[in-house]
């Protein structure tokens, strides 16, 4: 069974301001993009992040072969309890998801 990382060119996460994170799935080809759009549900991403699916915004950008997920940060960036100041640690959670 393939993972997201096996299909796409890159999965990147970063801050989208002090209150939001974004995870970009760069598919590289239209074929990989279609496979990700069809196989990677927002529900599965929410489960991986352990958040309510209603808090995630999904953007399927077919002209760029990119799928983007944005979600509120667990704590405000820079808070004393913030364990990932730059938001870079969220990408592996998506990259390691298996595709059906």
Image (cartoon, rainbow, N blue to C red):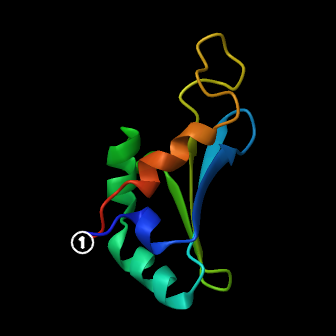
Tell me if 51 is positioned left or right of 2 in this view.
Answer: right
Q: Quick check: can you spot residue 75? A: yes
Identify which residue is drawn at 75% across, 39% down.
17
Circle 1 is placed at which residue position?
A: 100
Q: Quick check: can you spot residue 24? A: no
Q: Residue furthest right?
A: 17
Tell me if 86 is positioned left or right of 23 in this view.
Answer: right
Residue 95 in which image quadrant: bottom left
Q: Nearer the viewer, residue 1 or 45?
A: 1
Query: In x, y percent, where is residue 54?
Result: 42, 50
Split into 4 quadrants, where in the image is the N terminus?
A: bottom left
Split into 4 quadrants, where in the image is the C terminus?
A: bottom left
| In the rendered image, the vertical position of residue 53 relative to residue 75, given as above or below | below
Q: Residue furthest bottom?
A: 31
Tell me if 4 is positioned left or right of 84 in this view.
Answer: left
Query: In x, y percent, where is residue 69?
Result: 55, 57
């Amino acid at each position: 069974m393939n993972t997201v990382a096996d299909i796409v060119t890159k999965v990147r996460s970063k801050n989208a301001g002090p209150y939001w994170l974004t995870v970009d799935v760069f598919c590289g080809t239209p074929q990989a993009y279609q496979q990700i759009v069809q196989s990677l549900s927002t529900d599965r991403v929410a489960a991986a992040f352990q958040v309510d699916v209603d808090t995630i915004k999904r953007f399927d950008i077919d002209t760029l072969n990119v799928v983007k997920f944005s979600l509120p940060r667990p704590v405000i960036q820079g808070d004393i309890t913030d364990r990932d100041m730059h938001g870079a640690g969220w990408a592996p959670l998506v990259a390691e998801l298996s595709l059906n």
